Image (spheres, grey):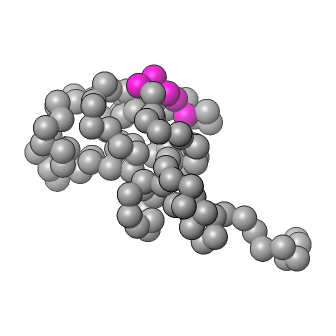
Amino acid sequence: MWCRACGEEIPVHGRVPFRERCPKCDAPLHACLNCRFHDPGAYNQCRENRAERQVDKQRENRCEYFEPAARPGETGPAGTGAKDRQAFEALFGKPPAGEGV
Ligand SMILES: [Zn+2]
């Protein structure tokens, strides 16, 4: 997943722990702002209508429906699978060999 606060990419395996924080900027990761269901235009700013309303979208929450949001431009579900990661790295990740600075 990635941190909305600083843009850092954080590897997650399975579910994001409730208290997980960004290793770079210390922002809570399990927060509405990092969730794929977060939508400022939706009721309670959440597209998952079974989820409990979270008052502060930037603080960590205990929402059962939290799923990491994809980066802008990234399609499909959040990249938690190995296949997604490979596709991501193929597109943006590792610099091509032989192109030094
Ligand atoms: Zn961060």
Is the magenta region chiefly helix, strand or loop?
loop
Q: Which residue is depicted at the point 51% across and 53% down?
A: 81
Where residue 54 appears, x then y in whole percent?
A: 22, 30
Where residue 40 appears, x then y in whole percent?
A: 22, 49
Q: Is residue 86 left or right of residue 40?
A: right
Q: Is residue 5 left or right of residue 99?
A: left
Q: Is residue 82 left or right of residue 60?
A: right
Where residue 65 appears, x then y in whole percent?
A: 27, 37
Q: Which residue is depicted at the point 40% across and 33% down?
A: 30
Q: Quadrant of residue 77?
A: bottom left
Q: Quadrant of residue 32?
A: top left
> Where is 40 relative to 18, above or below?
below
Q: Which residue is depicted at the point 78% across and 74% down?
A: 96
Count of labels shown? 0
Q: Is residue 82 magenta?
A: no
Range of residues picked out in magenta: 18-22
> Where is 95 relative to 25, above or below?
below
Q: Which residue is depicted at the point 45% across and 65% down?
A: 74
Quadrant of the frame with the C terminus: bottom right
Where residue 84 appears, x then y in whole percent?
A: 52, 61
